[in-house]
Each structure stands twice: as structure tokens, then as C-alpha cells.
Amino acid sequence: MDNLRCVAVDDEPLALQNLESYIRKTPGLTLVRTFLNPVQAHDFLSSDPADLVFLDIQMPDLNGIQLSRLIGAQTRLIFTTAYSEYALDGLKAGAVDYLLKPFGYDEFLAAVAKVRSFVSAGKLQSGGLQDLWFVKSEGRLVPVLLSAILYLEAGDDYVHFILDSGKKLLVHGTLKDLETRLPAGMFFRIHRSWLINLSKITAIDRSRVFFGNQYLVVGEAYRDAFADLLKSRSL
């Protein structure tokens, strides 16, 4: 994948320096400009659009949500905020992901990985409500990005949502029902117990599907269908 041209906007100097450091040391990202002033960022982006913009939400004169509406539709957004209550607003505004301050480099990399997933899947700016589901887990409705799911694992009358952050959600229901509702081009059944996110696969070795250091084994009854899928999508 080509390098992503990045712009970072945050009115807090220390937060902006931290973000700049993360961008500069990450392969595949090129830092174009940083801005403490959101109005100046708007002026720059109007004439020189970026591939990816890291955008603080609470800023004077022009807040991050307002600025996001003025940025070209082909630009991916990752919001940065110190207030979790603004996270859903960021997703509604079309962000691929949000980072809750103070965030570490591992969280930064996970958010960037989501952007890469959208690009590789041909989903320019497909975050936000199109990618956002609400699932009932432990009596609460929890917002979940489909692009953040590694795989779903079936239980007796529940399903575990295994997310790329390492978090697990326990949701009442069946894998069969979810299989019919999730995008077929994005999710695929490889076992009676597992429905995987194809865009999260890092490698395939014989009957093993890898997600980083962990792997799942393709069930015998599903191997032919999975092999046909791989053949249809192989170069």
C-alpha cells in the first residue's frame, strides 16, 4: 500500500507533539503538516487534501466535528479526544476510529490498521454509521465497529465478539443469525464455531488462518468453500 499522507490537528501543543512522534515513526505514514489552529488546518486542507487526518474534537473557533464536515469525502478521519462522550459524535461524523487521550502507541497503531483495512477493502470513508453496530452485552448497548471485529466465536446461546483491541464482548444470539446479517464480502464462516473478518487475516498456512500471532483452524466441512473463496480472490 502507498504511504498515507497525514495531517494532525490539535490545539494542545503536547498532544500534537505526541501525535507527531507516533506518525513519524510509523512505516507507511508521511506527516505533511501539523496545526494548532483548526482554521489554518481548514485553509490548508482545502487546497491540499490529505489521505488521513488526526483531528482533536474540542478546539476554539472551529471544533473537530465542524472541521470534519469541511474536509473532502476521500479523506479518512481519526478523532482524538479526552472525552469519551464525544466518541459517538466522532463516528457519526464519518470517522474511521477515535483515540481517547491519553493513548499509547499500540492504540494508535490499531486505529491506523483500521484505516488500512478500509483502503484495502475499497472503503474510502466507510467508517461512521455504515460501519457502526450496537450490540447488547451484559445488559448494555455497546457501539462496535464491524471493522474492529477479528472474528466471532459461538457458544451455546451466545456469541463472543473478539475485537482487534483484545477486548471481548459476550452477546446473546447465534452465529447462524449473525452470519445472515453481516456483510458476506467482509465476513466468512470457516468453522461451526467461527465467523471471521476477512480483512483482518494476516496470513494463511494450509488450514490455519492467522490474525497476528493467533490462528484458527478451518473446519473440514468448510475447507472447500474457503478454498474456492481464496481462489476467486487470488492474483
Image (spheres, rainbow, N blue to C red):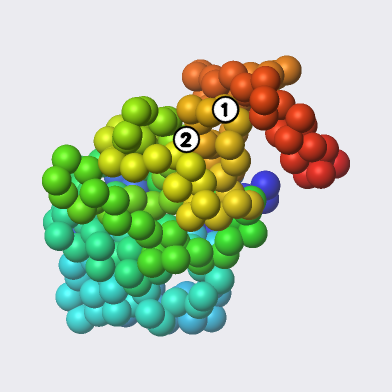
| Disc 1: CA contacts within 10 A as few (<14), some (14-19) or many (>=20) | some
Residue 141 visible in the picture: yes
Q: Quadrant of residue 220?
A: top right
Judging by the rendered image, the residue that carries numbered circle 2 is 151
Task: Say whether residue 94 is left or right of residue 227.
Answer: left
Badge 2: residue crowd in 10 Å (few <14, some 14–19, many ≥20): many
Q: Secondary structure at mark 1?
A: strand
Q: Position of residue 141 (x, y in %)?
A: 20, 53
**Picture coordinates of residue 203 (x, y %)?**
65, 26
Query: Is 43 left, or right, of 116 in this rendering?
Result: left
Q: Amino acid at mark 2?
A: Tyr
Res 191 label: 1
Residue situated in front as seen by the camera: 129 or 107 = 129
Residue 153 vs 2, above or below: the answer is: above
In what quadrant of the picture does the C terminus appear?
top right
Which secondary structure lies at badge 2? strand
Which residue is at the front of the view, 105 or 113? Answer: 113
Quarter-of-image position of residue 43: bottom left
